[in-house]
Amino acid sequence: MKGIFRSLRGFNYRMWAAGALVSNVGTWMQRIAQDWIVLTQLTHHNATAVGVVTALQFGPQVLLLPLTGFAADHLDRRKLLLATQAAMGILALGLGILTVSGLVQLWQVYGFALLLGCVTAFDSPARQTFVSELVGEADLSNAVALNSTSFNAARMIGPAVAGVLIAGVGAGWVFLINAVTFVAVLGSLSLLRIDELHRGDRAVRSRSSLADGFRYVWQRPDLKAVLLMLFLVGTFGLNFAIYISTMVVSVFHAGADTYGLLTSTMAIGSIAGALLAAQRARPHIAILLIGAAVFGLSCALAAVMPNEALFGTVLVVIGMSAQTFTTSTLSLVQLSTTPAMRGRVIAIVLAIALGGTPIGAPIVGWVSDRFGPRWALGIGAASGIAAAIVAAHYLFRYHHLRVRFDTGRLRLSIDGDNEAPVSG
């Protein structure tokens, strides 16, 4: 276990992880409350409206890409995070006051989602690349995986708490509690030991800064394959708020407590996937292939589950496979990108992963409204299988992937690497 949690040996990472965990719990509480009031209070079970909220929240990742990557590479990341985290806390406070007072309307939720998306567009690449300043290159992959573990531990705690609070005191108080949790991450950023940060060389300022990032990616077949996979899964697969909420309301006819519980259940698998990623020193694109394939198959299985208990069981597998895929993607990109380009490349990665949501979320929401939530899950299944095909094509073309069966066990061999068992 010491190997899995080795990044926590450093003071700065311990401080950051503690503050981020508290804030992430609040963030997940708000996500559940926001989707629930849109689906059940501000509309009559309109999944398309939930998709629009999701699209507004993640669309700025693409629109602001020329600025966000530049900011992550050229500005002091700690100070940038202090500003973005404070702004997110203020937005949570504003939405909470409107909801508690009974004045909240759907267009206001849309507006807050858009503003939060703009702030998050600057926050995400800075937060992802800031990890390398906390631990250095040697423990970067481990720290990225532990960040995901913390995020998904919060995903397990936050939704369950939110479901109880929504039923007991209302969604408005959930937003207000989230606003308070930002004090934790702001405090941790303020207490970091500045002289112990691993700050590398800053990128050279130029007008073609973002273009340099795209040129860098275009010259790398591995990064192009990874980004295409991420676009497919991020756009059409990672729409869990729509999948779970519509299955709860339209198929299982349950309430907010069940919605929160099922979201927390999926987080159990996500934590397991993140901890497995933390054990690996360096991920390989073959891991992405396996994660995408299992994600697609498990989404297809979830679509036919007859009750919430079995649905929740499959959600554990979905969470594990999705987290394996996303965590390994971030680690692979960061470790294979030169430090001077890392902020811009990560901004491109996040723009593709989250910026595809404005395309995918409304489509998935419309399919759910028109054909039912089970068909919406079918879109997620297709995205995972398509991403696995992209990875297989890359590996066959550039790494001479060989697949064979040996006494009932599937094995992969890549460029003469030792053959590794994939499944029993």
Image (tube, rainbow, N blue to C red):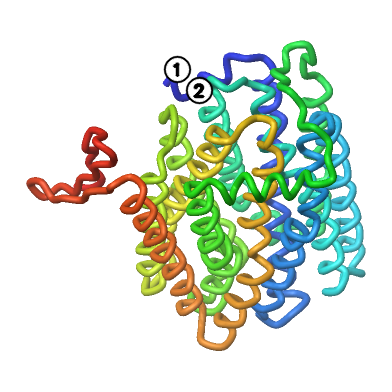
Q: Report the residue at 60% width, 64% height from top.
A: 241
Can you give x and y, in whole percent of width and height, for residue 4 in the image?
Answer: 45, 24
* Element type at mark 1: loop
Can you give x and y, in whole percent of width and height, for residue 400 in the image?
Answer: 28, 47
* Element type at mark 2: loop
Q: Is residue 177 visible?
A: no
Can you give x and y, in whole percent of width and height, for residue 280 in the image?
Answer: 41, 30
Q: Identify the residue position indicated by label 2 in the image.
A: 5
State the CA–CA distance, disc 1 to disc 2. 5 Å
* For the residues bearing labels 1 and 2, Cβ distance under 8 angstroms: yes
Q: Report the residue at 41% width, 72% height from top.
A: 303
Q: Amino acid at mark 2?
A: Phe
Q: Tally the marks.
A: 2
Q: Which quarter of the rendering shows the N terminus?
A: top left
Q: Is residue 232 left or right of residue 168?
A: left
Task: Categorize mark 2 by other alpha carbons within 10 Å: few (<14), some (14-19), many (20+).
Answer: some
Q: Amino acid at mark 1?
A: Lys
Q: Which label is found at residue 2? A: 1
Quarter of the image for residue 315 reads bottom left
**Along the viewing direction, whichever of 153 and 206 lies nearer the viewer:** 206
